[in-house]
Amino acid sequence: MRTVATGRRRRGAELEEAILRAAAEELAASGYHAMTMDKVAKRAGTNKNAIYRRWPQRAALGIAAYKRLAGARTPMPDTGSLRGDALELLRQTNATWSSPRGAILRDLLAAAADEPDLLELLREQAGASVMNAAWLTLLSRAVARGEAPPEAVHPRVAALPMMLLRGEYAVRGVPAVPDEVLADIVDEVLLPLVRGRGRIR
Amino acid sequence: MRTVATGRRRRGAELEEAILRAAAEELAASGYHAMTMDKVAKRAGTNKNAIYRRWPQRAALGIAAYKRLAGARTPMPDTGSLRGDALELLRQTNATWSSPRGAILRDLLAAAADEPDLLELLREQAGASVMNAAWLTLLSRAVARGEAPPEAVHPRVAALPMMLLRGEYAVRGVPAVPDEVLADIVDEVLLPLVRGRGRIR
DNA sequence: TCCCATAAGGTACGGATAGTACCGTACATC
DNA sequence: GATGTACGGTACTATCCGTACCTTATGGGA
């Protein structure tokens, strides 16, 4: 016994859009672990074939769906001081990572860890390079204000705060990192390093 | 039809030992994802009941088995300079993390991420605190040699290199981090920070 | 020496889910 | 109107976690 499809049959981009929307909704509703291929297919009003034809694995669909969940980028902070900017950017990231979206991101990261293609895709879609650029901009502005020596604009310095925050999550687990720790990262590591780079060597 | 067990029946500690050994062998052979409860039971010559009576979840068994896989601790480096010690310790960790054991560790970390108990257990058994102590010792010795100001002996400074290395793995994925990056972490971040802490503020 | 609670062995099963196969059918295109 | 491609529907394989249930050996106490 088989139900006959009466309505119009979606194809191509339209169907793809419906699948992505459904996957994003599943992600938002219960996270990546609950984003079942069957459930996505059902919610999208299609079947798994149509999905697997586009994304060969569950993780690939998850990453694609995450992109639209991530949505609009957060605004670039501009508080007038390096310390204020850095703290603000750390707080924004901390808020994201401690939210349900952060949990999804971590699950996706774990799922993609073994496959370089997926990892690259995820890094792209999660806006890692955007974030990196933001930190470089932030440092450049500090240099322009005379707050920091030109040597401070360095990729490894720019990546430092995010890496430390990530490390805090790895050590602590789920809950949000306390604000004092964020301040510590800025005051005890980032600022001394930025200032030190101009004076030594 | 049922096979009758003819031999002696193992109990308690002896059986537990056999299970742990089997689990560790499975881990070593094909990693955590392939460490099936059925396979462990079969290899240990027992059944899943005996396992679940001791470890309520697969992840718990995985963590327990990892401990014996990790085995002997690596020796504390002592090259005579902070730079040399730091680089050596980073290299040791890099070697571990890029080995199959590192992949197992990452998988376990991902599996335990949602459960604080397991996360704590893993951190214990993976020797995180030992590593932290090693870095503090390393800094203390540098202070004793007059290479660094006393303020350098600080938990956040001590945790810094490992966090940056971990971050590199998150960004790059599987393969080992190149030695130049390790040197960069030491020369561009750790040493400037250590020296800077004594002079500023 | 006997008895019995406990833990082990054996096996089967429930439930979930990734991914595949197959076939009929609508739709776009020519 | 013919045709190839992609979609819908469905069933199926395979895997694996965790549980249930019964039988049986073992060791300690009465």
Image: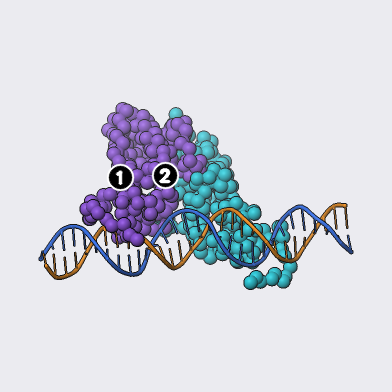
Chain colours: A purple, B cyan, C blue, D orange
Mark 1 surroundings: few (<14), some (14-19) or many (≥20) residues within 10 A: some
Q: Residue at x 56, y 64 (%)?
A: B39
Mark 2 surroundings: few (<14), some (14-19) or many (≥20) residues within 10 A: few
| Mark seen at residue A30 | 2
Q: Residue at x 30, y 47 (%)?
A: A21
Q: Which residue is mark 1?
A: A68
Q: Which label sits in the foreground, 1 or 2? A: 2
- Tell me residue A119's x, y (percent): 37, 54
Q: Check the image and name the residue furthest to the top.
A: A80
| Residue type highlighted by circle 1 | Arg
Give the vertical position of A11 relative to A94 (above or below). Answer: below
Q: Nearer the viewer, residue B155 or A54?
A: A54
**Chain to which mark 1 belongs:** A
Q: Nearer the viewer, residue A7 or B198?
A: A7
**Chain to which mark 2 belongs:** A
Left or right of C10 on screen, residue B59: left
Of callouts 1 and 2, which one flags the residue occurring earlier in the amino acid sequence? 2
- Tell me residue B123's x, y (percent): 56, 47
Residue A73 seen = yes
